[in-house]
Amino acid sequence: MFKRTLAAAALAAAAVVPAIFTVPATAAEAAYPARPVRMIVPFAPGGPTDVIARVIAQKLSEIWPHQVVVDNRAGAGGNIGMGLAATAPPDGYTILVVSSSYVVNPTLYSKIPYDPYKSFIPVTNAAASPNVFTVHPSVPAKNLQELVALAKNNPKKYNAATPGNGTTPDLGVELLKLTTHIDVVRVPYGGAGPAVAAVIGNQVQIGSTALPPTTPHIQSGRLRAIAVTAAKRSSALPDVQTTGEAGFKGQEADTLQGVLLPAGTSKAIVAKVHGDIVKVLAMPDVKERVATLGFDVVASSPEQFAAQIKAEIDKWGKVIKAAGLKAD
């Protein structure tokens, strides 16, 4: 009996020892956040990444004892803000919210101020929106099969407007060209607004843009949707085929809204930030707000987001190299 009691006491002591030695770190992490948190958005105010970041920041400010302040650091396709976040202390007081430029820029630019694998810890892909191929109503194609056939029979006749060089809608056109061997001219504009307007005005016959700024014009009849670049149909356009349903596999392309923390941030803080953001994204009013922007809540795990980052860097890297694209 004495031996059993002694053994039990030893086990209990062994269990207590690690807890004693980890009290300072655990206490600091338990108190997180103990001051305001900066959320860097590497784009100008008003865009989808900024809006979604502000929705998350507002809700976290309600949950946490301190405010989350959005800091817009636009420029160089997001590189300026992402580079700033890469050099921030890994203490949890700098959060980065990115779009798909995070996975495109490593190949599109000859030099970037961050390493997509080493500079950050993936937290979650908060939300994503597919892109959509559209045409001016005067174009006779009603679906993607008909559009591809039309372009093949009329090489160089059709142009495709995109929101900018190296954006996922822009790369989606190049991916379709590589897959189907159609000869259309890609026309990058300075944002989704000008690209959509160019197709509405029939200055360019085809459009490839993100869903949020395009959906109202599809619903009004000013544009005809040809296909969405998603694995499943969009709730915003339930009657529009996916590229896969149209017979073109591997054309999926969306605009992600990812959350990252500087490399070296403790696992406890990463887990807290992830868990609280997932709670925020599950709130009915947040889901509704995200949906009105044309996005679907994803709320992936850190592991899932890390795998997505690698897969998309590889995918878009091949497209960029094959098309010979460079942003500098």
Image (cartoon, rainbow, N blue to C red):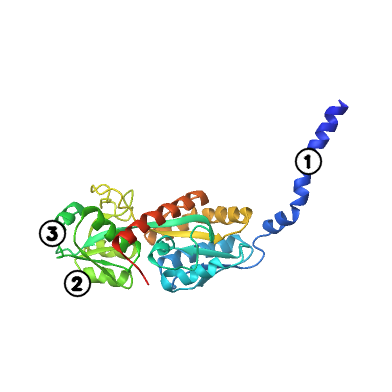
Percent x, y of residue 234 = 32, 53
- Which residue is pictured at 49% across the width and 73% down the height? 73
- Which residue is pictured at 31% across the width and 61% down the height? 171
As rendered, which of 236 and 314 lies closer to the eye?
314
Percent x, y of residue 250 = 31, 49
N-terminal of the pair, mark 1 or mark 3, is 1
As rendered, which of 200 and 216 lies closer to the eye?
200
Q: What residue type is labelled 2?
A: Gln
Pair 2/1: label in front: 1
Q: In this view, does 6 lie above or below 214?
A: above
Q: Disc 1 designates what residue?
A: 14
Q: What residue type is labelled 1?
A: Ala
Question: Within 10 angstroms of label 1, few (less than 14), some, or many (20 or more) residues?
Answer: few
Q: Disc 2 designates what residue?
A: 203
Q: What residue type is labelled 3?
A: Pro
N-terminal of the pair, mark 2 or mark 1, is 1
Quadrant containing the N terminus is: top right
Q: Which secondary structure lies at badge 3?
A: loop
Cα distance in 3D space between marks 1 and 3 = 76 Å
Percent x, y of residue 113 = 49, 68
Q: Which secondary structure lies at badge 1?
A: helix
